[in-house]
Structures are given as C-alpha cells and as structure tokens.
Image (spheres, helix red, strand yellow):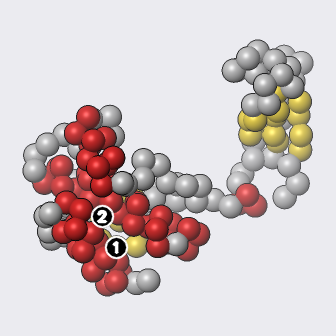
Amino acid sequence: MNNQELQILTEELSLEFFGRPFVHQIIFNRRLRTTGGRYLLRTGNIDINNRVYELYGREELISIIKHELCHYHLHQQGRRHQHRDQCFRELLTKVGGARHVKALISEKERPYKYRLICRKCGQEYYRKRKVDVHKRRCGKCYGKLELFYLDQ
C-alpha cells in the first residue's frame, strides 16, 4: 500500500464512520517507532507507522486510522480530543478503533537481555540490566523472582 491508497482509504473511512470528510493529508512515516500513528494538531495531517500494515495487515491499519480520525474530527469540531477525555473514548468505542497498537518490535529486536519471572504469581518483567534477585521482589505480589538470560 502506498500513500495515495492510504489517503483514499482514510477518506472513505471518514465518510463511512464519521459522516464527515477528511480534507487533510495522511502519509506513512517510517520514522515512527513505538506508536501506530499520530495526529498533528498544527497541520491537521496524520502520520501512520508503516510497520502496522507490514506486520498486522489491513484490519489493524484500519483500526489505527479510526483512532487517529477520532482525534482529527474532535479537534476539527473544537471538542476535547485527548485520550483521557470522555468524548474521545465514547467516539472511539462507537467507531471500533484501537485503543492501543499491537507490539511493533519483534522479539529479536527487543533491547532486553534479562527476563524475571515471579515464582508466586508468574508475573514477567523484562530488563536491560541484570538485577539482584535476592534484593528485589515482585511488584504485584511481593514474591521471589527468578532471573533468566534472553538469547538473541
């Protein structure tokens, strides 16, 4: 999918789910790393992480576009458009957009070297640096932790 196809898809989704036209520009932005997309307040444009489409396909891409269109349309109407606002949450639920993007970094690309697992509740923690399991405890149940080195 290229930027022109993305623009057409977004305009169709905007009319279908919001009943309003999308009159700005949407593009794939390869520089986005951890986020699925972003709505730019100053320009009204939307950037989408191309890895969403590459890793998860069209359905996840549509879900992210709906999320960004919620920001877009609420802001254009002068209404509250942040994640914590009730207006945003209601509109997002109504149109079926994603609240969060799935992981965009594969297991091999993760920067973690160590995995800690709680012996009591099974909670997992990932760390870049080694920790002393005799001094640390689980943050959930205060159980003892077990340290594993991740092979990469």
Q: Earlier in the sequence, mark 2 or mark 1?
A: 1
Dividing the picture into quadrants, the one containing residue 55 is bottom right
The answer to which of 37 and 86 lies nearer the viewer is 86
Q: Identify the element where label 2 is drawn.
A: strand
State how far apart marks 2 and 1 are (Cα).
7 Å
Label 2: few (<14), some or many (≥20) within 10 Å?
A: many
Q: Is residue 139 above or below residue 92?
A: above
Q: Residue at x 27, y 59 (%)?
A: 69
Q: Which three-letter amino acid code belongs to the residue tagged 2?
A: Ile
Q: Is residue 41 above or below residue 48?
A: above
- Residue 123 pos. (x, y %): 75, 31
The answer to which of 76 and 111 lies nearer the viewer is 76
Q: Residue at x 72, y 51 (%)?
A: 111
Q: Residue at x 82, y 42 (%)?
A: 114
Give left or right: position of 18 versus 96.
left
Circle count: 2
For label 1, the residue is 27
- Residue 30 pos. (x, y %): 48, 70
Report the quarter where the N terminus lies.
bottom left
Report the quarter where the C terminus lies.
bottom right
Q: Tag on residue 148? A: none
Give left or right: position of 6 versus 151.
left
The residue positioned farthest toward the left in the image shown: 77
Q: Residue at x 27, y 80 (%)?
A: 8
For label 2, the residue is 46
Residue 51 in view, yes or no: no
Dots 2, 1 in contact, CB < 8 A:
yes
Label 1: few (<14), some or many (≥20) within 10 Å?
A: some
